[in-house]
Image (cartoon, rainbow, N blue to C red):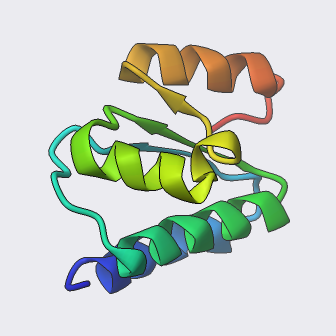
């Protein structure tokens, strides 16, 4: 709950840019996720999607992974084992001149 609002605040400038945002969140160090955290992830997904962008997760494990599966968010927000795999998927989704 304490960091969910910070996530949204930190990403606000990304969504204010004139290009389609491509965001990868590395959750390797995340060990706990409650409804506030899930709400923050959904908010980031919505902002990215509305701006024509993309959100992916990497390093999802343990309790956060179980929460994503229980809520069905794993079917909406793609997750990759490594940052390299997420970056490759992002590159395949967007033309080179549009990704920044």
Q: Quadrant of the N terminus?
A: bottom left
Tell me if I can see residue 93 in this picture: yes
- The x and y percentages for residue 6 are 30, 80
Q: Between residues 58 and 22, which one lies in front from this camera angle? A: 58
Query: Quarter of the image containing the C terminus?
Result: top right
Find residue 25 and report its horizontal and vertical position in percent.
Answer: 41, 46
The relative height of residue 51 versus residue 82 in the rendered view (above or below) is below
Q: Position of residue 36 (x, y in %)?
A: 38, 81
Please name the residue shown 45% across and 77% down the image.
Answer: 8
The foreground one among 81 and 96 is 81
Give the residue displayed 78% in from the left and 59% down from the top: 49
| Vertical order, 18 against 78 (above or below) | below
Question: Is 75 on the left-hand or right-hand side of 71?
Answer: right
Judge by depth and name the residue closer to the eye, 82 or 39. 39
Residue 38 placement (x, y as % from top left):
46, 69
Residue 67 figure quarter: bottom left
């Amino acid at each position: 709950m304490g960091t969910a609002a910070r996530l949204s605040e930190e990403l606000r400038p990304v969504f204010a840019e004139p290009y389609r945002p491509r965001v990868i969140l590395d959750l390797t160090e995340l060990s706990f996720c409650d409804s506030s955290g899930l709400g923050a992830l959904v908010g980031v997904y919505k902002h990215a999607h509305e701006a024509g962008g993309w959100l992916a997760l990497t390093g999802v494990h343990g309790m956060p992974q179980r929460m994503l599966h229980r809520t069905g968010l794993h079917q909406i927000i793609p997750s990759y084992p490594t940052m390299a795999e997420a970056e490759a998927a992002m590159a395949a989704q967007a033309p080179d001149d549009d990704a920044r």
